[in-house]
Image (cartoon, rainbow, N blue to C red):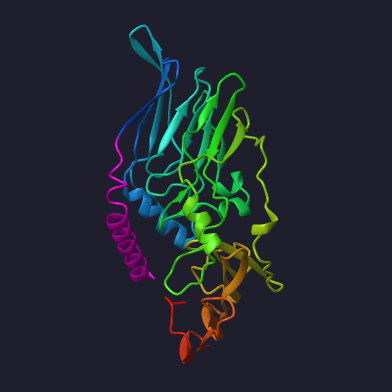
C-alpha cells in the first residue's frame, strides 16, 4: 500500500508539473480589497505539500492522517486614516490557497473561490465567511449546479471551468455567481468517434467565455435563491445497485460518466480496500443521447466476468473476460480505443 501511495504522488506531481506548469505557479501572498477600499483581505498560502497530503488522506479514508504543512491564513483589516486595524485572522478552509476572493463593502462578508491547483473541484469551490472569519457555508460545485448543468462544463485533468467575474450585490447582501454552462454537452472528439455534424457545429460556435447563467446566494446563510436547472434532455442514465451496496459516480473526459457499486460497510470508503463489488459502467453523451460505453462488474475489488466496450453506438463491442483481475480472453473487432 505504501508503494502505491508513493507512486500516486509521483504521478500527481508529474501531472501537475507538466500539464499545469504555466497555469499553476507556486502560490504567493495575495491581497483583495472591497470595492469601497475600506477593507482588505490578505491571504497567506499554506504549503504546497498540503495538496498531496490531503490526497493521501482521502485515499486512506481516515481522519488520523496528519497534514503537516503550514495552513492557509486569511487576515481581514479595516482601513482607518492611513493605517489598517486587524478585524480577524483565521485559517481558511483551503489546503493551500483559494484562487480568488471578494470582500464586502461592509466588511461583514468574505467569499473565496476554488482551490489552488484544482478549480471547480472539492469541498471549497465557494466558501462564505462572516465578520469574525467563521465559515457560514461551504459549497461543492454539485451544491450549486444540477447534474444536467455540470455535465455541460469544460474540464481538464484537474480542473472544471465553471464561472468567472463573480460579484457581490451589496444592496441586497447577495453573492452573484456567473456560470459558464455549455448549451450542449461536450461530445468528445477522440479519433474514430462519430459525431453528428450539427453537434460539432454547436460546440464550435460556443463562446467559452460568455456568461450563460446567473445564480444568486444569500450571504447571511448561503441559501440559494436561483435553484439549479434540470434539463431532462441531459439526465444521467439510471443506475441501481443490489441490496447492501450503494452507487457512486463521477465525471470522465468530455460528457462521460462512470458509475459503480460499492459494498456498504458502514463507513462508505472510497474503494481504497476491497469493497468494489458489483456492476460498473461508463456512459457517454453523444449526438443528443446517452449510451453505455463500458459495462462490467467487480468482485471483491477485482474485475471479474465479461467486460465490454463500444466506441460508437451500433458497433460490435470489444470484449474482455476476467477471472478476478486476470485477463483470460479478449476480442475487439474495431481495435482498442484507450483502455478500460
Q: Look at 32% across and 64% down and name the residue there.
A: 11
Q: Look at 65% across and 44% down and name the residue there.
A: 228
Residue 217 among magenta residues: no
Residue 156 shown left or right of residue 183 in the figure = left
Front position in the image: 218 or 23: 23
Name the image quarter holding the N terminus: bottom left
Residue 204 drawn at (x, y percent): 47, 54
- Labels in figure, total: 0
Residue 86 shown left or right of residue 312 in the figure = left
Whether residue 265 is visible, yes or no, is no
Whether residue 321 is visible, yes or no, is yes
Residue 161 drawn at (x, y percent): 46, 48
Residue at the far top in the pictured view: 81
Q: Look at 52% across and 39% down and name the residue there.
A: 211
Front position in the image: 88 or 42: 42
Magenta-drawn stretch, dominant element (helix, strand or loop): helix
Which of the 4 quarters of the picture holds residue 285? bottom right
Residue 190 shown left or right of residue 140 in the figure = left
Front position in the image: 144 or 112: 144
**Residue range highlighted in magenta:** 1-28
Residue at the far bottom in the pictured view: 329
Say if 141 sits above or below 110 in the image. below
Residue 15 among magenta residues: yes
Which of the 4 quarters of the picture holds residue 35? top left
Residue at the far right in the pictured view: 243
Residue 263 drawn at (x, y percent): 62, 71
Residue 93 drawn at (x, y percent): 46, 40
Say if 58 sits above or below 275 in the image. above
Which of the 4 quarters of the picture holds residue 280? bottom right
Q: Look at 33% across and 45% down and name the residue there.
A: 69
Amino acid at each position: 500500500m505504501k508503494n502505491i501511495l508513493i507512486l500516486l504522488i509521483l504521478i500527481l506531481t508529474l501531472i501537475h508539473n507538466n500539464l499545469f506548469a504555466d497555469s499553476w505557479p507556486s502560490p504567493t501572498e495575495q491581497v483583495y480589497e472591497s470595492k469601497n477600499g475600506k477593507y482588505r483581505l490578505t491571504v497567506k498560502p499554506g504549503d504546497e505539500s498540503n495538496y498531496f497530503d490531503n490526497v493521501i488522506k482521502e485515499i486512506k479514508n481516515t481522519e488520523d492522517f496528519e497534514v503537516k504543512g503550514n495552513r492557509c491564513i486569511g487576515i481581514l483589516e479595516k482601513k482607518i486614516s492611513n493605517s489598517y486595524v486587524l478585524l480577524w485572522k483565521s485559517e481558511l478552509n483551503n489546503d493551500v490557497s483559494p484562487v480568488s476572493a471578494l470582500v464586502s463593502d461592509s466588511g461583514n462578508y468574505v467569499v473565496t473561490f476554488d482551490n489552488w491547483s484544482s478549480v471547480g473541484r472539492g469541498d471549497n469551490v465557494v466558501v462564505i465567511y462572516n465578520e469574525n472569519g467563521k465559515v457560514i457555508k461551504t459549497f461543492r460545485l454539485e451544491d450549486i449546479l444540477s447534474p444536467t448543468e455540470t455535465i455541460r462544463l469544460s474540464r481538464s485533468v484537474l480542473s472544471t471551468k465553471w464561472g468567472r467575474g463573480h460579484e457581490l450585490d451589496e444592496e441586497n447582501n447577495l453573492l452573484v455567481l456567473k456560470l459558464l454552462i455549455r448549451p450542449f454537452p461536450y461530445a468528445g472528439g477522440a479519433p474514430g468517434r462519430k459525431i453528428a455534424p450539427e453537434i460539432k457545429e454547436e460546440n464550435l460556435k460556443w463562446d467559452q467565455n460568455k456568461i450563460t447563467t446567473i445564480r444568486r446566494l444569500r450571504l447571511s446563510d448561503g441559501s440559494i435563491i436561483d435553484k439549479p436547472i434540470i434539463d431532462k434532455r441531459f439526465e444521467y442514465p439510471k443506475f441501481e445497485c443490489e441490496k447492501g451496496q450503494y452507487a457512486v459516480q463521477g465525471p470522465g473526459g468530455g460528457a462521460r460518466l462512470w458509475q459503480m457499486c460499492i459494498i456498504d460497510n458502514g463507513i462508505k470508503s472510497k474503494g481504497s480496500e476491497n469493497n468494489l463489488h458489483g456492476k460498473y459502467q461508463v456512459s457517454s453523451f453523444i449526438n443528443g443521447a446517452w449510451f453505455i460505453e463500458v459495462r462490467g462488474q467487480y468482485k471483491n475489488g477485482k474485475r471479474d466476468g465479461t467486460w465490454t466496450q463500444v466506441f460508437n453506438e451500433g458497433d460490435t463491442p470489444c470484449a474482455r473476460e476476467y477471472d478476478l483481475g486476470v485477463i483470460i480472453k479478449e476480442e475487439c473487432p474495431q481495435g482498442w480505443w484507450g483502455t478500460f
